[in-house]
Image (spheres, rainbow, N blue to C red):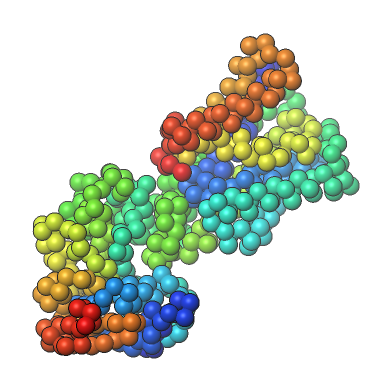
Amino acid sequence: MRIKNLAKYFDGVRAVDDVSVQFRAGKITGLIGPNGSGKSTLVDLLTGFLPADKGLIYIQKQDGIKSVNPSKNYSSGISRTFQDARLFEQMTVLDNILVVLTKRNVLLSLFEQHTESHLKQSEKVLKKVGLWKKRGELAKNLSYGQRKLLGIARTLAMNGDTYYFDEPLSGLFPEMVATVKNVLQDLKKDGKTVILIDHNMDFIRSLCDTVIVLDSGKILAEGNPSKVLAKKEVIDVYLGA
Amino acid sequence: MDYFIHLAILISIYAILALSLNLLAGYTGLISMATSAFMGIGAYFVAVTLTRFELNFFVALVLAAIVVGVIAYLVDFALSRFRGDYFAMGSLSIVIVASGIFVNWQSITGGPLGIANIPRPNVFGFELSENWHILGLSLLFLLFTYLICQWIAMSSFGRVLRAIREDEKAIGVFGYDTSKYKLAAFIISSALAALAGGLFATYFSYISPVSFTVTESIIVLTMIILGGLANNKGAILGAAVIVLLPELIRFVGLPTAIEADMRHIIYGLILILFMLYRPQGFLGEYKL
């Protein structure tokens, strides 16, 4: 997936400022930067959660490269988690998964009930994050870590080509961190494009193939994580020098 | 006996209304005040077509549902821009506009005097003149409405509606055009309210604007909050309790004028107490 000259302004503030970058399949790309650098806004733009003011997105599809106008919300096989999970609180864990597996057409969905394959897919992703036994519980009753895992399971259920994970590891117990790391590695092995936002540089170093550093909505540096994180300007941005 | 049949008919008609609103408020999270407006349009449509054009009741009822569905579709162009409390306020304006039309379009609606002598339904030459006939008919329509609502609740469509209720933007990111889902729910809900309106018109054989005010919408909302939002059985239970509860006051022996006011006081109290202490109602799965 490639983005070209993507921009988003909030009352004159350039949250994402003319960003052009490429995300490769079968790689985990880390997206880092200090608070307010534009990471989450960039992901919001890429997933259609926010409309962009400018720019284009090119997505590699089976039938060739597709250009998407990000100024309109779109659905193009891109799946994401949110920093604050954004679950469907008063629905069961299972329904949180089943709902994203259903038809996107209003009329067709009226005559569709969940099928055996939907259940199997739900079971697969919930087992992957260790929540299958919790499938009958309401999402609002889950612990903080379980909520994060359910958000990840919901994203996996989409079976898309590109995945964004917005701070999936923050606040998790070590065993949950291991689960999430496995999920990310498996997606990489399956040739998916994975974009990871996180503040923990150890995770970024150990998980990512490439890292992109954002500052004030612009790309400050990109490349191999160890090299990029050793750059003076990157350290300055993080330490506020 | 006729008294109990009368109550059962009222429960059936209000249960249809409660089910229709539950689809919108309970499942989709859109608190609508427009229920009485769509019920009224359905009632007037049936009344006019029966008294002036001598249309068959069932044809008139189907046409009423279609016409109200089309009106809901048009109204949604404006309403779909609102969310939460603003949607409720926007829907309130529909009742005000509809009430204005019922009162002022005298050549069609009869103005404040309304329309009288609305005939009872006729099935292959047999007039459903007895109240228990209407009870059977109302129960059939209630069953029909319940099955539709239950089907929707169990379908993928219903699950998306609940996700919209929980977090519309989040489900939108997963590729669902939420405005289309909300529009479909609004149209179905309005058409069902029109069915209740048609039954109301033929049962009472008289309608006037006072039957379709915002108070009626609030009463229906009270029913689904009491019975339990996002639960179709709860909607029916709520309708039964709200219709029957004021009847108990009759046995207290209060003067008639106070008795009528007590009815509204009871509705208000129930609404406040349930919102405070049991927001999920008797059988509900969802808290406002």
Counting labels gives 0
- In this picture, residue B128 sits left or right of residue A12: right
Residue situated in front as seen by the camera: B224 or A42: A42
Kindly indicate the quadrant of the structure image that contains residue A40: bottom left
Kindly indicate the quadrant of the structure image that contains residue B280: top left
Give the quadrant of the C terminus of chain A: bottom left
Residue situated in front as seen by the camera: A230 or B179: A230
On the image, the x and y values in percent for residue B200 come to 70, 34
Give the quadrant of the N terminus of chain A: bottom left
On the image, the x and y values in percent for residue B83 come to 53, 56
Residue lying at 22% horizontally and 64% vertically, measured from the top left: A168
Residue situated in front as seen by the camera: B84 or B192: B84
Residue B29's place in the image compared with B280, above or below, is: below
View extreme (right): residue: B107
Residue A54's place in the image compared with B99, above or below, is: below
Residue lying at 36% horizontally and 53% vertically, measured from the top left: A88
On the image, the x and y values in percent for residue A157 come to 28, 62
Residue B42's place in the image compared with A223, above or below, is: above
On the image, the x and y values in percent for residue B167 come to 42, 56
- In this picture, residue A173 sits left or right of residue B120: left
Residue lying at 58% horizontally and 62% vertically, measured from the top left: B81
Asked whether residue A124 appears in the rendered view, the answer is no
Asked whether residue B48 appears in the rendered view, the answer is yes
Kindly indicate the quadrant of the structure image that contains residue A126: bottom left
- In this picture, residue A176 sits left or right of residue A98: left
Residue lying at 49% horizontally and 49% vertically, measured from the top left: B29
Residue situated in front as seen by the camera: A2 or A21: A21
View extreme (front): residue: A241
